[in-house]
Image: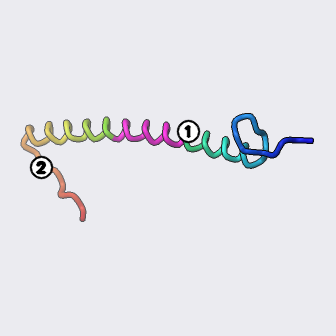
Amino acid sequence: MHEKCRCNKNCYCDIWIDYQVALNSLQEAEELAHQNWLEIQHLYDRVSQLESFIRKQGLSLPEKPD
């Protein structure tokens, strides 16, 4: 006879397995979102530097769309 499932780390019921899969998916999503944010920041810095360079050359930039 099996003990009553309490859904803890020693349990292998469907609920616990689903929880572990969901937790793993959320951790992976967080890692990807963090890496994406770092990439966005890097690209924003590059765009800012390029805009500054263009303005120093006496050129104008198109207006930002609404």
Please rate how many residues cluster around mark 1, counting C-alpha atoms within 10 Å: few if below 14, some from 14 to 19, many from 20. Answer: few
As drawn, is 16 to the left or to the right of 64?
right
Q: Measuring 55% from the left and 38% from the top, which residue is drawn there?
A: 28
Q: Measuring 73% from the left and 43% from the top, which residue is drawn there?
A: 17
Quarter occupied by residue 6: top right
Which tag, 1 or 2, sits closer to the chain's start?
A: 1
Mark 2 secondary-structure assignment:
loop
Q: Are marks 1 and 2 in contact (CB under 8 Å)?
A: no
Percent position of residue 65, x then y: 24, 62
Percent position of residue 30, x then y: 49, 41
User: Mark 2 highlights which residue?
Assistant: 60
Q: Observer-nearest residue: 40 or 14? A: 14
Residue bounds of the magenta highlight: 28-40
Q: Observer-nearest residue: 58 or 10? A: 10
Please rate how many residues cluster around mark 2, counting C-alpha atoms within 10 Å: few if below 14, some from 14 to 19, many from 20. Answer: few
Q: Measuring 43% from the left and 38% from the top, which residue is drawn there?
A: 34
Residue type marked 2: Ser
**Main secondary structure of the magenta stretch:** helix
Percent position of residue 54, x then y: 14, 40
Disc tally is 2
On whether residue 62 falls in the magenta region, the answer is: no
Residue type marked 1: Glu
As drawn, is 38 to the left or to the right of 66?
right
User: Mark 1 highlights which residue?
Assistant: 28
On whether residue 38 falls in the magenta region, the answer is: yes
As drawn, is 65 to the left or to the right of 2?
left
Q: Measuring 73% from the left and 49% from the top, which residue is drawn there?
A: 15
